Amino acid sequence: MIVSIGEIVWDIIGEKKLLGGAPLNVAYHLASFGLEVYLVGRVGNDELAETTLRHIADIGLSIQYIQQDTSLPTGRVLVNFNIENEPSFDIVAPAAWDTITSEPFLASVSKPFHLVFGSLAQRAVQSREAIRQLRDKAELLFYDVNLRPPYTSADIVLDSLNGADIVKLNDDELIQVADWSGISPGSMEQRALDLSKKWKLLCLAVTRGPSGAMLVAKETLYTHPGFPVQVADTVGAGDAFFATLIEGILNKRPWMECLANANKRGAYVAGKVGATPSMRDFVF
């Protein structure tokens, strides 16, 4: 069983509203592989809440552990794109996902589970404590660094790395997190190797946009050039990559196969509008 905990948000892209948030996006892709996955999050008691819950159910995810806040609004993020089609995010605060609690889930589940979590949902004390409580109970910890300044401080990231098993970040985040970790300057490849070794990771994955991705496992570096794609938008591509990597690890696929599959699914999502497109036509 896999638990994905954190922010549930509506990405506002121009006139469009698309439901997302990295934990939801990863959970969607994990569920599409047929894995047992639960999303733990929180929405408001506003006009978006009912639409949110209905949409989560419509894309195949359980709403059993989606909490509802009586005072804070459902999360929203204003998304803009630069000339290279890379997104920037204006994250509305505070939001309902700042007040997630762990009790409803921990009180009803006794079987082992793996945990997927990120940095952003830890910006507020209550959600940060809920994530820590689940981290203490989980078997494998899958951590997506996903820096969103000013909400993702060095303290949050370094605390999350301590004990994480599998970590995903992009090339810009690699530079920042390596600096925070006291890793000496050098090539991206060497810094990835050093970062993985410092934090004793089972796997470190670094996405590199159109240049593909690299992966460090057991002090071995694997690289993949990626797949060509006509980009529609890049929102959710990294989440699709991470979910596919998780699926590969849990099914004990060879590391190079894990990396190639993750790249292919990430590229496919980048070619679609929104973070949770239908995956019925996707094949490895």
Image (cartoon, rainbow, N blue to C red):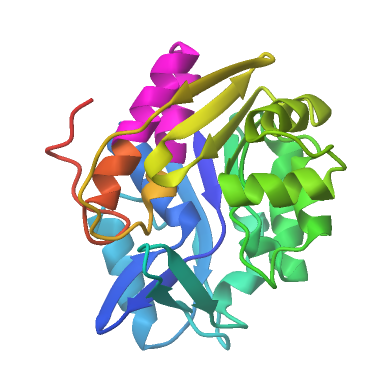
Tell me the magenta residue range. 241-264
Which residue is at a point 57% across and 85% down the rendered structure image?
A: 72
State the residue lying farthest toward the right: 182
| Residue 206, image x, y percentages | 55, 37
**In this picture, is 239 found above or below 225?**
below
Quarter of the C terminus within the rendering: top left
**In this picture, is 263 found above or below 274?**
above
Which residue is at a point 69% across and 15% down the rendered structure image?
A: 219
Which residue is at a point 39% across and 32% down the rendered structure image?
A: 262
The prevailing secondary structure element of the residues shown in magenta is: helix
State the residue lying farthest toward the front: 186
Q: Can residue 141 be seen in this view?
A: no
| Residue 25, image x, y percentages | 40, 52
Where on the picture, by quarter, is residue 224?
top left
**In this picture, is 117 found above or below 78?**
above
Which residue is at a point 57% across and 59% down the rendered structure image?
A: 6
Q: Is residue 87 visible?
A: yes
| Residue 111, image x, y percentages | 58, 30
State the residue lying farthest toward the left: 281
In the rendered image, residue 164 lying in the magenta stretch gets the answer no
